[in-house]
Amino acid sequence: MSDLAKRRILVIDDDPVIRRVVSKSLADAGYEARSAATGAEGLAIARANPPDLVLVDVMMPGMDGYQVCDQLRHDPLMVHIPVIMLTALDQTESVIKGLRAGADDYLTKPFDITELITRVEAHLRRSERDINVNPLTGLPGNPVIEQIINERIAMRAPLAVMYIDLTNFKPYNDEYGWLKGDQVINMLAQHILGALRDAGNTSDFVGHVGGDDFIAVTTPDRAEKLAKEIIERFDAAIPRYYTDHDRERGYVQVLDRRGKPYRAPLVTVAVAIVTNKNRPFTHLGQVAAAAAEVKKYVKSLPGSRYAFDRRQK
């Protein structure tokens, strides 16, 4: 299991013996194990450095395992993380409640350590195969993005899908290199997450399509404020990713496809917003088609901008 070595496992349990035994067993199996004695402490650790899998006890004082799982499932950065619940309860209703809270699996104490390690490995492999987490940002990829949007469409809930990407990014990559480009992409990801955490709903979602393309799922009443927040945060941060010379003159001198020099403006962010406020959607293709038109328009505008799809049908 060398390909899974050094994956981060977070153990949340108020029993110090369980924490010590499970953490040591995970470390012996090649994982990086961290532990927390309370649900609140565990969430703080997870938010500071998201783990690859969470083992959480159900019965804990204060915030119990169900609440921890619910919080993880409503955090856009951690919605995809596998959760295995540990409990001394061997009752059907407890299992059902845990699964409804978003848990992926369930182990009853006392459990066999070998079985626990096997289940951890199985869920990590399944997560790697199915969730398609982007290796650069750690955000869920296309399979989860499609699942989330399709679920919201099926629920007929208020829906706003924000397609977010960078304008003038290729010239930046050509001039500064892909390592610096990756830093800009990561910076954008963090500001999208920060905007949703500060101004979004608890059920909002962020996914990374690939490259400099992101998708945020929210509600129509929050979309405009979120777009403004993302633009404001990105525009404040992007100058630091240029040299003093390029920043002061406001462009990068690069060559076009024909080898001729031209002045490429500084990188900006474009946000295309599609909602079901004025018209219903029945499938993801309708959302994507509408967003493509809005995205083309907003990227033609100077500076960082956002725009809504205003069609009625």
Image: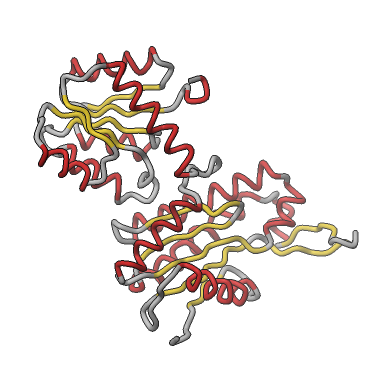
x, y percentage for residue 84?
A: 27, 33
Question: From the viewer's perspective, is 67 left or right of 285?
Answer: left
x, y percentage for residue 8?
A: 40, 28
Residue shown at 16% from the left, 38% from the top:
95
Near-viewer residue (133 or 16): 133
Question: From the viewer's perspective, is 114 left or right of 224?
Answer: left
Q: Farthest residue in the bottom direction?
A: 312
Q: Farthest residue in the right direction?
A: 259
- By what rule are the colours in the image chosen? secondary structure
* Vertical placement of residue 32 versus 274, above or below: above
Name the quadrant containing residue 224. Answer: bottom left
Question: From the viewer's perspective, is 11 left or right of 144?
Answer: left
* Vertical placement of residue 189 versus 225, above or below: above
The quadrant of the rendering that contains the C terminus is bottom left
Q: Farthest residue in the front direction?
A: 92
Question: From the viewer's perspective, is 146 left or right of 18?
Answer: right
Name the quadrant containing residue 20. Answer: top left
- Number of labels in the image equals 0
x, y percentage for residue 155?
A: 29, 67
x, y percentage for residue 74?
A: 30, 51
Residue shown at 40% from the left, 35% from the top:
49
Residue shown at 35% from the left, 47% from the top:
79
